[in-house]
Amino acid sequence: MKRCASHVGGAILLVTVATLIAWATAPYPKFKPASFEEEPLAAGVAPLSEAVTLAQFANEDGAVRTMLVLTFTSESVTGVDLEAFGATASDDPLKALASAWEGAANRVAKRLSLA
C-alpha cells in the first residue's frame, strides 16, 4: 500500500512540475490568461445603437462620477454626466447607469401623469 501511495504521489508531483515548467517557458505573456483575437484590439466608443460606453472620473470634491462617453482622444474624454439623468453616485458604473435609467423613467412617468 505504501508503495502505491508513493507512486501516486510521485506522479502528482511530476505532473505539477511539468505544468509549472510548461507555463514558465510558454512564449505567451504570463499574466494575460487568454486572448482570442488575432490582432490587437483598437480602443473606440461603441455607437449608441449597439452599446453604451461608460467612464468614471472624480469631480472637484473627489466623488466618483460616471459619464456616458460620446467621444475620446488620447488626452480627453467627452460625455454626459449620468447625474444629469438622475443617477445616484456609485463606484459601480453599471449601478449608476441603472439609477439614471430609473430616474429618467420616473421623470417621464411623472410628466405623463401631469398631461
Image (tube, rainbow, N blue to C red):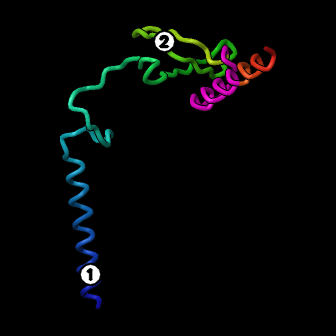
Q: Can you give x and y, in whole percent of width and height, for residue 30 in the image?
A: 28, 41
Q: Nearer the viewer, residue 96 or 2?
A: 96
Residue that carries the numbered disc 2 in the rendered image = 70
104 drawn magenta: yes
Vertical placement of residue 54 versus 11, above or below = above
Q: Tell how many labels.
A: 2
Residue that carries the numbered disc 1 in the rendered image = 6
Q: Nearer the viewer, mark 2 or mark 1?
A: 2
User: For the stretch drawn in magenta, what is the main secondary structure?
Assistant: helix
Q: Is residue 46 left or right of residue 29?
A: right
Helix, strand or loop under label 2? strand
Rate crowding at label 1 as few (under 14), some (14 to 19) or many (20 or more) other CA atoms within 10 Å: few
Q: Nearer the viewer, residue 98 or 96?
A: 98
Vertical placement of residue 32 versus 63, above or below = below
Q: Amino acid at mark 1?
A: Ser
Within the image, what quadrant is residue 60 found in? top right
Q: Is residue 113 left or right of residue 89?
A: right
Vertical placement of residue 8 versus 41, above or below = below
For the N terminus, the quadrant is bottom left
Q: Can you give x and y, in whole percent of width and height, for residue 2 in the image?
A: 29, 88
Which residue is at a point 26% across and 78% down the rendered structure image? 8
Rate crowding at label 2 as few (under 14), some (14 to 19) or many (20 or more) other CA atoms within 10 Å: some
The residue segment tinted magenta is 84-105
Which residue is at a point 51% across and 22% down the rendered structure image? 54
- Residue furthest out toward the bottom: 1
Which residue is at a point 55% across and 21% down the rendered structure image? 56
- Residue furthest out toward the right: 114
